[in-house]
Image (cartoon, grey):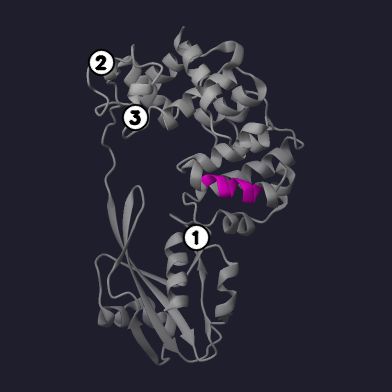
C-alpha cells in the first residue's frame, strides 16, 4: 500500500468531526483556512462558528464594516488576516460578481491567500490536483523521508512542494490533502508523536534513524525586537476616557488608550515630563498611578512588548468624551482586552 493510501485510510477511520468538513462551499473552506492560519483548531473553531453565524455568505461579510469584522476577530491575533479577509470578500462581491474563484491561480489573487490556502480551497472544493504544504505536511514529509533541508529556506519550500505534489492522489486530491494535514496534527505531532501506532512506522526514516526530535529542520532567522509601551488610561470626573485608532504597524485599525512608546522602561516622573503627555493634558491637573506594579510582557512572534498601564485621573475635558461603558464596543488587541478585564474586577 502506497503512502497516500495509508494516510487516507488512517484519515477516514480517525478524522475529527469539524464543522467545515461537512461542506465543500468555498466561502466556508476559505474562512476556516484563514482562521486556522497561526491558530490551533480548538481555538479557531469558536471563531469559525461566530463568523458563519454573523456572516453566512461572502456577500454578508463584504457588507460588514471593518470595525465589525475586527471586533468579531478580537482575541485571535494576527489581525491582518481579518483585514485581508474583509478586503477579499469585497473584491469577490464587487469585482467578481459574488462568484468565488474556482482555480488555484485565481484564488492566489485574493489578498491574504498564498500557496497553501489556494491549494486547500482548489483541491477540497473544486477537485484541482494541487498539493497543500503546511506545518503539518512539512513535519510528516521531513520525518518520513528523512529530509534535512530547512523547511523555511527557499530550497526547502520548493523541495517539499515538489515532493507533496508527487505524492498527491490526483483522483481524490481534496481527501488526500486533508488526510496528510490531519495525520500531522493528530499522529505525527511536533512533540510526543504516537510512532508506535503509526501506520507508517515500518518505513519512516526518522523513526529508524532516531531523528524524530531533530526533524523538521528550521533555520533561525527571527530577531526579537523589544518595545516599551506606556498606555495612558484616562479617567475624568464624569467617568469618560479616550481611545485612539492605530494607523500603522501591529494592530492596525484596532483601538487603544493614548500610547507613549519609549526606548526603555520609564517611571512616573519620566512619563509626566514626556512631550506627548504634556501635549495631551496641557495645563490640566492630573494624578498618575501605575496600575500594574509588574511590567506586562506581551510576546508576539517578532517582538516583545513591555507594557505599563498608567491610570491618569483628570478633570472633565472635551478631549476625553468616550464613556467608559462604551469601550467594549470597539475592537481592541488582546493586550488591551486583558487589561480591561483586570481593571473591571480590580
- In the rendering, at what x and y percent does residue 261 appear? 34, 67
The magenta stretch is: 44-51
Q: Quadrant of the C terminus?
A: bottom left
Is residue 75 depicted above or below 93 in this figure? below
* Residue in the picture at 22% in, 17% down: 209
What secondary structure is the stretch in magenta mostly built from? helix
- Is residue 210 on the magenta stretch? no
- C-alpha gap between disc 1 and disc 2: 53 Å
Query: Residue under circle 1?
Result: 247
- In the rendering, at what x and y percent does residue 243 appear? 51, 72
Dividing the picture into quadrants, the one containing residue 71 is bottom right
* Residue in the picture at 67% in, 29% down: 24
Query: Tag 3, which secondary structure?
Result: loop
Is residue 317 depicted above or below 125 in this figure? below
- In the rendering, at what x and y percent does residue 44 appear? 53, 45
Query: Residue under circle 3?
Result: 193
Do callouts 1 and 2 mark residues in contact (Cβ within 8 Å)? no
- C-alpha gap between disc 3 and disc 2: 14 Å
* Residue in the picture at 50% in, 41% down: 41
Q: Is residue 111 visible?
A: no
Q: Is residue 61 left or right of residue 167?
A: right
Which one is earlier in the sequence, the residue at label 3 or at label 2? 3
Query: Tag 2, which secondary structure?
Result: helix
Disc sitting over residue 208 in the figure: 2
Task: Please tell me which residue lies in front, 326 or 286.
Answer: 326
Is residue 162 depicted above or below 37 in this figure? above
Q: Is residue 217 visible?
A: yes
Task: Please tell me which residue lies in front, 113 or 53.
Answer: 53
Do callouts 3 and 1 mark residues in contact (Cβ within 8 Å)? no
Amino acid at each position: 500500500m502506497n503512502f497516500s493510501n495509508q494516510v487516507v485510510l488512517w484519515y477516514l477511520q480517525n478524522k475529527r468531526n469539524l464543522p467545515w468538513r461537512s461542506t465543500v462551499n468555498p466561502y466556508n473552506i476559505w474562512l476556516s483556512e484563514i482562521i486556522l492560519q497561526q491558530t490551533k483548531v480548538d481555538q479557531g473553531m469558536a471563531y469559525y462558528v461566530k463568523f458563519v453565524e454573523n456572516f453566512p455568505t461572502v456577500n454578508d461579510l463584504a457588507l460588514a464594516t471593518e470595525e465589525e469584522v475586527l471586533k468579531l476577530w478580537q482575541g485571535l491575533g494576527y489581525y491582518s488576516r481579518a483585514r485581508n479577509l474583509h478586503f477579499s470578500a469585497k473584491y469577490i462581491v464587487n469585482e467578481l460578481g459574488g462568484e468565488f474563484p474556482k482555480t488555484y491561480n485565481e484564488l492566489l489573487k485574493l489578498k491574504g491567500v498564498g500557496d497553501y490556502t489556494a491549494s486547500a480551497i482548489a483541491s477540497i472544493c473544486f477537485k484541482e490536483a494541487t498539493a497543500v504544504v503546511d506545518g503539518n505536511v512539512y513535519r510528516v514529509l521531513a520525518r518520513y523521508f528523512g529530509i534535512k533541508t530547512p523547511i523555511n529556506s527557499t530550497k526547502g519550500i520548493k523541495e517539499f512542494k515538489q515532493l507533496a505534489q508527487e505524492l498527491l492522489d490526483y483522483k481524490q486530491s481534496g481527501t488526500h490533502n486533508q488526510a496528510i494535514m490531519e495525520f500531522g496534527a493528530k499522529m505525527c505531532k511536533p512533540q510526543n508523536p504516537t510512532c508506535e501506532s503509526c501506520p507508517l512506522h515500518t518505513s519512516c526514516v526518522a523513526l529508524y534513524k532516531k531523528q524524530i526530535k531533530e526533524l523538521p529542520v528550521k533555520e533561525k532567522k527571527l530577531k526579537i525586537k523589544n518595545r516599551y509601551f506606556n498606555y495612558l488610561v484616562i479617567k475624568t470626573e464624569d467617568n469618560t476616557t479616550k481611545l485612539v485608532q492605530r494607523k500603522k504597524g501591529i494592530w492596525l485599525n484596532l483601538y487603544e488608550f493614548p500610547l507613549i512608546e519609549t526606548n526603555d522602561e520609564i517611571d512616573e516622573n519620566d512619563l509626566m515630563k514626556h512631550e506627548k503627555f504634556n501635549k495631551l493634558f496641557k495645563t490640566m491637573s492630573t494624578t498618575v498611578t501605575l496600575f500594574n506594579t509588574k511590567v506586562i510582557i506581551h510576546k508576539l512572534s517578532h517582538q516583545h512588548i513591555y507594557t505599563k498601564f498608567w491610570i491618569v485621573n483628570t478633570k472633565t475635558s472635551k478631549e476625553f468624551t468616550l464613556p467608559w461603558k462604551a469601550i467594549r464596543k470597539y475592537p481592541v488587541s488582546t493586550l488591551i482586552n486583558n487589561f480591561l478585564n483586570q481593571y473591571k474586577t480590580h
